[in-house]
Amino acid sequence: MHAAQMLSTHPKAKGKQNDALIRCIESCYDCAQTCTACADACLGEDDVSHLVQCIRLCSDCANMCAAVGAMASRQTGDNMAVLAAAMEACAKACQACAKECTKHASHHAHCRICAEACTSCQKACEDARDALR
Amino acid sequence: MHAAQMLSTHPKAKGKQNDALIRCIESCYDCAQTCTACADACLGEDDVSHLVQCIRLCSDCANMCAAVGAMASRQTGDNMAVLAAAMEACAKACQACAKECTKHASHHAHCRICAEACTSCQKACEDARDALR
Amino acid sequence: MHAAQMLSTHPKAKGKQNDALIRCIESCYDCAQTCTACADACLGEDDVSHLVQCIRLCSDCANMCAAVGAMASRQTGDNMAVLAAAMEACAKACQACAKECTKHASHHAHCRICAEACTSCQKACEDARDALR
Amino acid sequence: MHAAQMLSTHPKAKGKQNDALIRCIESCYDCAQTCTACADACLGEDDVSHLVQCIRLCSDCANMCAAVGAMASRQTGDNMAVLAAAMEACAKACQACAKECTKHASHHAHCRICAEACTSCQKACEDARDALR
């Protein structure tokens, strides 16, 4: 991804290094993809009826991550309080999804990978929110 | 929109009327459209340099509303705590955008209309979050 | 929705009435919501294993409609050829989803409603694309 | 990103390697982020009035890439004709955005980087569409 390059060439951010923000942006886009793929992989399993809650949480998490990935990519103007609340909601979505995916991790490798991506994105969102202050 | 019909025919929601949720879903999709259009209309104004903060807040608000509109449309499984946090973040995004758009409302009718849509969506998100409990 | 009001107050569109475009924008946001809700309602049915293809097509249709709804909302600058191709792809997504949902319409009312929304959105996208020329 | 891992563990795709599809998925999420960041970076430039068309094309490209990135991530069920049309529309969005960003590449490094991401995503979408057949 080009998040670091885009941030370093941004007229309002140039010079400011913000590793926590870069990790948050990249993790959100990554997690949006992983959760979209995991919801679909769960839907393709023979035991789909046991994975209904997992599909729901993956779908919600994908929506939140896509929103926060875009919002965190913006540096022009100021929307800090809103971004902080969105990152917090996203961290919660990731945590809930990771918890559910972990239940299926031993049966379905895609759930194991998705749980890892969600846990990583949860931490990235929390760190980036703390770095906003 | 078909949100009320879709909710009343949903296997997990059938029979339960939830007017606050329906208003939240419809307001979020409406506000996502309105904010996308307002950001673009601001970009087309001669005084675009004075509308930079407005474009930023409209863009962020559109992202949050799109995410919450989709999440609130789901009834299968349970993700209440995450949905509540997302609705709260969305209400904040709407409030911030309404406040900024109101500053430009006397010059630009699209900002006046957008401020109204955002204020209405803020209330719908707050009411739906309260109704979750 | 506020699409008509936003278009009539847009600095680049003021005065030009474009009913086909307004219907396309509103239909896309409506259909994005309806398809998201139908995918989730199918997921909540006892016969979810028979609705897997329906969930896939609804999910894809929701993604295309959300993208085209946003793109069609923009009037500043010019991106006609891209918008036409996107509307055409969206019409195809709607047509495919309507066809699949129709198969389940007698068993599941949400599929009947979704098929209607998709067929309506397909026509709106085709009409708006024709009106671009 | 985890696209390759998610594809290799998907119940419907397991065993089939599809490098073109993986590149398309990853490029779409990358390009969605890059275009969102470039639209915002252009908005933050002193010469924003010269970058209006660039902001429009970046915004549209971000919407198309986000939609196709999600759609291409799905392997359950079949929606080939729709996906092909969406990839084609996305390639066009990337091409138009790359062409416009290139005009500003010598003044704004973010436009140069964005043009590269768009050109790369255009090719990835075209290759993935060809590989669908």
Image (cartoon, coloured by chain):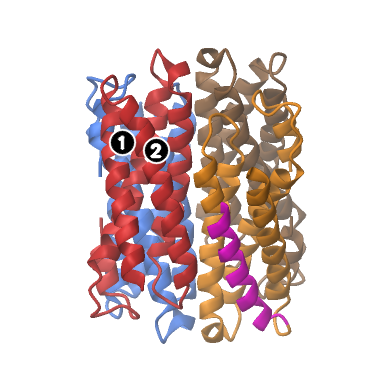
Chain colours: A red, B orange, C brown, D blue
Q: Secondary structure at mark 2?
A: helix
Image quadrant for the N terminus of chain B? top right
- Can residue C73 be seen in this snapshot? yes
Of labels 2 and 1, earlier in sequence is 2
- Residue projecting furthest to the front: B133
Kind of residue indicated by mark 1: Cys
Q: Which quarter of the figure has residue B110?
A: bottom right
Judged left or right of residue A40, residue A8 is: left
Residue located beneath label 1 in the image = A114
- The answer to which of C67 and A45 lies nearer the viewer is A45
What mark, if any, has residue A97 been given in the picture? 2
Asked if disc 2 and disc 1 are in contact, CB closer than 8 Å, the reply is yes
- The answer to which of A121 and B67 lies nearer the viewer is A121
Residue B8's x, y, as percent? 74, 30
Residue bounds of the magenta highlight: B87-105
Number of residues whose C-alpha sits closer than 10 Å to that of mark 2, classed few (under 14), some (14–19) or many (20 or more): many
- Can residue C87 be seen in this snapshot? no
What mark, if any, has residue B44 been given in the picture? none
- Residue found at x 65% / y 54%: B125
The chain holding disc 1 is A
Our reading of the magenta stretch's main secondary structure is helix
Residue B71, relative to residue A26: is it above or below? above
